[in-house]
Image (cartoon, rainbow, N blue to C red):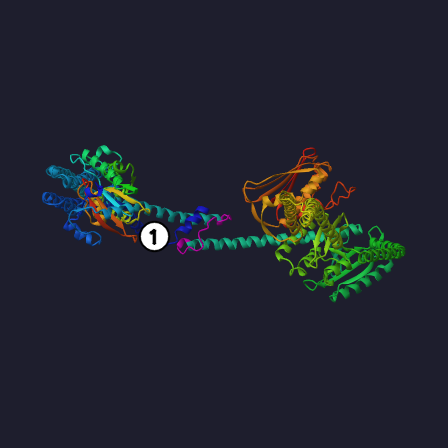
Amino acid sequence: MTSEKRRGRRFRLGLKTWVFVAPIITVLIFAGFLIVVLQTNSEERRALERLQTTAISRLGQVTSLGESVAAVHLEMQSVLGRAVELDEGELYDLARPHMNRLHDIKEELKSVLSTLDPQTLDGRLFRQLAQNFETFHEDYISAVLMTSVNLDVHAEQMRRTNEQYQEVFHTLGELTNVNLQDNSDASEAYAAFDRRLTQILLAGLALCVPLSLLVSWFINRLMSRDLIGAIRAMGNLAKGQPSEFQPDQNRTDEIGELGRAISYFEGILDQLRQEVSERERSETQYKGLFDSAGDAIFVFENRRYTALNKKAEEMFGLESAQVIGKPLGQLSGSVHGSKEKSVEILNEIFDEARKGVPQVVQWRGRKLDGTEFPTELTVTAFAGPDQTEIAQFMVRDIGEKIEADQLRENMTAELERMVSERTEELQREVVVRRQTEEALETERKTLKAVVDYAPIGMILLDTENRVRLINNWIRMAHKIPDQICTPGTPYIEILKHILTSKRNLQRDPKKLEEILSERTALLERRESNVIEDILPNGSYHKVERRFVDDVGCIVTNTDITDLKSAQNELVRQEKMAALGALVAGVAHEVNTPLGICVTAASHVADIAREFNSEIQSPEGHLTRALAVERLSNIGNGLEIVERNLNRAAELIKSFKLVAVDQTADDAREIELGAYVESTIQSLSAETKRRGLTVKFAEPAEGLNRLTFPGAIAQILTNLIMNTGIHAYDSNGGEIEIEVQRLRNGADRISVRDFGKGMDEETRTQIFDPFFTTRRANGGTGLGMHIVFNLATQRLGGKINCRSKPGQGTEVEVVLP
Amino acid sequence: MIPGVILTVFLIGLPLQAAQASSEGDTSNSSKNLIESALIDELRDGGFIFYIRHAATNHAIADSDRGNLANCETQRPLSELGREQSRKIGVSFAKLRIPVAKIIASPYCRAKNTAILAFGRAELNDDLKFSLGSGSENEGRQADVLRALLAEEPATGTNTVIAGHTANLREASGVWPKPEGVTVVFEPDGAGSFHYRTAIHPDS
């Protein structure tokens, strides 16, 4: 079937048209063949043409090369011929343009050679030509050179260049022959190609004749197949079978007409068959419906029983034959009075129903065995064919329905009773709940009051990080507007307000964004933490977040500004104490020379007084030798005074430097080695007193740097004193101080002792403020903290402490 | 005897070359001269370029492989006279106390050996090699290189020596150095150009 369909679509032309179409197809096939043959061979034709053109152009090239070489050779021969009469400079000038021409020809040959296939005869000959020409060129260079310095070789050079010219010329001749041969080969190939083309076309024509016959036969075969199909289809229809003939509906030819006619007849036959079977089916359906109805149905014609369904037989316990044909009123209960009376009532109902309104009545039915039961009777009546009256009784047994109604009434009463009991119970529960809610409300208010009036800032968050309560403290401290203080606001909003609105004038907004994102991240991880925060007004807040399971988070803010300032005050006091210690040391040191000075000065004064009295004395004891001795003693005394005063002045000067540095914090340019040494010097009184030996390794070079010398002095002072107290337990010991410049340009100051060292736990806390192992002995725990602050903040450097118990301690400060 | 007195100075420029050279505006034309002691004093102060054409060669042998200049066997070599001339040039420079710093030579063995025999060293410059037949483009470039070398002022108080061939100097300055072993003296003007000063015969 499908193959016929396909074929029907392919040929849409009429039978008569095909007579013309077949030869046209044949002609088209031949034309296509012709074009393909010509197309294919045109490539070959072009290749042949190219071959011929190449041969001809190569011939031209070789000829013009030959001409150029001959011309240059002639010129050069004439120049060399004149060499005898020329100066070597003149010879050079005359030969130069021709030599350049030779060079150009050489380059041209090279470029042609690079385009050729070295395997072909042409290529080989060209290579030989290029080689010969190169030698020819070299020979000419030698000829010019040699002739210019040695006229004796003139003849020989002329001969040599001539010989080489012969070689070149010979090769050129061979090349000409080869290309002439190529040209004639190409012409021959061209003629052979033409002959072959003619043969192919003749063969194509011969092939086309059987091909056209084949096409005609094929078309005929297809047409007859369609007709046979139509005849078979008519036979099928006559036998009452499907036609099985489906040509393309759009066919315009004769077969198309036939096909449409056959399918029209087939359609009509199908329609008839369907109508018959439809009718049979609907009758069966009605009968089934009638019999399977849930109610008993009686049909009356002219008020006599004519039909009843299975349910009716079942309900009244009878066979249809027992009542069919009998008049109305056979099955009425005795409550309706005598048989005549009940028939009368029924007739009235019939009359009413006859008006077109179905009548529904409660009726007492009676079975054939005499038992009676309540029914609901629906009566419909209408005019039947031939003036008859058709009526239908639908009888429903309502005995069970009445029982069910009774039961329902009982159950309703029970339900009402239960509802009233439950209502009372609910009322009691409501009272209890109200009391509980009141208690909760009180509790909530209490919590709110506690939070609101707490002396610290508090924010309570639920488990979703939304605000439950914010107390007044927080609102006042951060001036948070009321609209975002309402419960349910995400805590992020509060953070944003605190970190942005108030501070973007004081701080870099980018920095604030960073802080915000960091704190948000902490919040999302639900980690309890403590943060110290500086407010724009300079006060410090300690913010503590504590996450409590199932409750949320409690955020507390404490103002620790006082605590902070107390810490700072202690740090300042410690600084002053260090300064005081330094002053005491220097005062002690200065005291010694000054004491000597006083002694020496008073001694000199005595001598002077004595000398004076001797001069004044009338006795004239004063001899020349005595005067000389007195003056020499005075000189010696003054020398002592001078020396010690200088020493005192020196000490004062260095102390002044350190003292000024410690109080006034100006940056200035210092030489680090010398400065450290002078600092150690100014501490020498103190170190000596404590039995400490300070060894200083001087740097190899001068380490000049612009820095805060006061800070460096204080760091050293604190480190040295600390070592004395802690490393050597005030028993004295050795300290090594080293200053060096690192390769990256930073300077490193290291202070090393060989004392008792410390354990890891102590080492990690050593820079913490108020950490001390000697609280009982008056340690404040600020010394190292000051050192740390000075090194990292004042000097912008790094500080590092290495120590192990029993192995001493090294503190290293690196200044960038 | 004052060494300068025995040095005779040739001015080599022939009429034809002088005409060519005048277009470059640096050579003067005159007959043989004795070298003046004033010029020697100038040379001692430095600032000159000495272009030495390779010394006398064996004319019976021609160059047979110009592609490989490292091989001296295939080149026209210095003759015994040429070697003697080369050494003498070196001795004269030393005697006259003419300071020489930079010494540049053509890679041809005859030029290179002239420089090495005279001064014991030479820095080779490929563009100084004999330029005839290398094509007009190469010739032009080599002439430009040599012109630049001639115009380059030597380090203060020193002179520069270039050992090369005839054709290159002809292309660069118009001067044809003759005979073999001649020394032509140029003076850079400090502005990218140079002046011809004099030429000194190898036997003098």
Q: Is residue A199 visible?
A: no
Which x, y percent locates residue A269?
52, 53
Q: Which residues are magenta?
A: A237-255
Within 10 Å of disc 1 (Cα), the crowding (few <14, some 14-19, many 20+) is: some
Residue A248 is covered by the magenta coloring = yes
| A697 relative to A446 in the view: left or right | left
Q: Tell which of A741 and A191 is nearer to you.
A: A741
> Which residue sits at x=27%, y=35%?
B70
Dominant secondary structure (helix, strand or loop) of the stretch shown in magenta? loop
> What's under tag 1, amino acid-wise?
Trp
Q: Tell which of A746 and A400 is nearer to you.
A: A746
Which x, y percent locates residue B106?
26, 40
Q: Indicate whether A401 appears above or below A749.
A: below
The disc numbered 1 marks a residue on which chain?
A
Which x, y percent locates residue A72?
15, 45
Which x, y percent locates residue A747?
58, 44
Q: Tell which of A291 and B151 is nearer to you.
A: B151
Circle 1 sits in a helix, a strand or a loop, which is it?
helix
Residue for badge 1: A18
The image quarter containing residue B99 is: top left
Judged from this view, the residue extending furthest toward the front is: A619
Judged from this view, the residue extending furthest toward the bottom is: A355
Q: Is residue A204 visible?
A: yes
Q: Tell which of A318 and A56 is nearer to you.
A: A56
Total numbered circles:
1
| A297 relative to A742 in the view: left or right | right
The image quarter containing residue B164 is: top left
Residue A403 is covered by the magenta coloring = no
The image quarter containing residue A506 is: bottom right
